[in-house]
Image (cartoon, helix red, strand yellow):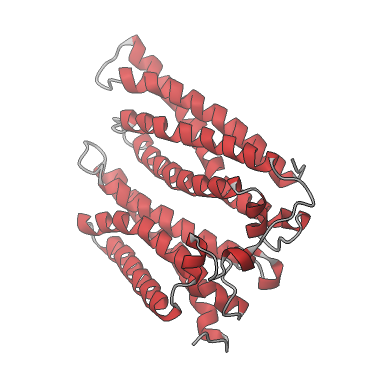
Amino acid sequence: MILHPGVLALLLSSAIVSVMALFAAFVGASIAKHWDITSSSELQLTLEKKTYLVATIINTALAIEVLSLFLFVFTADDIHKLFLGAMCATGSLNANPVGWYVLYIKILTFLISSAWLFINYIDQRCENYPLVKFKYKLLYVIAPLILLDFILTLDYFSGLKPEMVTTCCSSLFSGDEKSVASALAALPVRPMMYVFYIATFIMLTSLIVSLKTKAAVFKYLLFALSVPYLLISVASVISFISIYYYELPTHHCPFDLLQGQYNYVGYPLYAGLFGSVAFTMGTGIAEFFKTLQGTTEVIEKAQKRWALLAVIFLIVFATLSVWPVLFTSFTPF
């Protein structure tokens, strides 16, 4: 194992978050089973006290879990210099392929954890706590994912040793390879640009309309668009956004953007992408609970705030994606 500050922080935080999530899921199961807001029994009063504790614990745990996605990518990029043949995070992940599974699990956990945080936000601001049972049952899915994340993270970093020989992005994103990464790199640039710009326009338009109207159809559309837009955007980064920054038609790595020679543009780029997807998803998810008693006013206020944040994050991401296309002399055509 490599004793790097980022590695130690990830392992320690992942272990703590796993314990917190399992505890919250265990106590939450009891709350979900016996919760009755219409009752004034001693059991109900006890459950109401417990729900504040559990909500605080899981809020903290999931916030850490969301941030750990960015810490993991930063750490993978920072330790690449310890491996022979590695030039970025791709080399670090290739040094022990379990790292790719950690990345996928962290992205999935990011999305589900974000959804839970949005649901909890609504529930805690409604007088009748209409989502208590649902949000604690959702922990049955989240807690095992967080535990799996910890196990895979430990397995990944335990398998790394300094001076290991590994392959990097020039190999993984090569057209000669038969992999998802190479297939994404081989996507034709011009069609992908059209797909990306159209998807971004639809996303931004739907968000702006959602700010102006209470029509449910646009909120449901945002929910339906969020994850597909994430996939389209990642494919676009690999297909054409990256090569405009590198000004090399064969360099498709999505991780080199995190490095100093490219002004660390990858961090605001990915923060804009994941932030916009999370808040877009939250705006859409909230609409599903609008029919519950006592939620309408809380949800409408939250949706406006989240949609506005989604617009801001999306503008950041779109601007950074379009900037090199408009203001560099490089062209792949």
Pick the front one: 56 or 257: 257
Q: Is residue 208 left or right of residue 236?
A: left
Residue 328 sits in which quadrant?
Answer: bottom right
Q: In which quarter of the image is the N terminus?
A: top right
Residue 136 sits in which quadrant?
Answer: top left
| Res 254 seen here | no
Q: How many marks?
A: 0
Q: Name the spot of residue 294 as percent of width and height, x first.
A: 24, 37
Identify which residue is drawn at 54% across, 65% down. 177
Identify which residue is drawn at 54% across, 41% down. 65
| Res 278 seen here | yes
Q: In this view, does 235 lie to the left or right of 259?
A: left
- Determine the residue located farthest toward the top in the rendered image: 42
- Determine the residue located farthest toward the right in the rendered image: 163
Q: Name the spot of residue 161 as percent of width and height, x first.
A: 76, 45
Identify which residue is drawn at 36% across, 52% down. 281
Pick the front one: 26 or 288: 26
Q: Name the spot of residue 271 as percent of width and height, x first.
A: 53, 59
Above or below for 190 versus 320: below
Q: Name the spot of residue 147 as percent of width and height, x first.
A: 53, 32
Pick the front one: 301 or 325: 325
Identify which residue is drawn at 50% across, 39% down. 62
Above or below for 208 versus 35: below
Above or below for 73 versus 122: below
Q: In this view, does 271 lie to the left or right of 72?
A: left
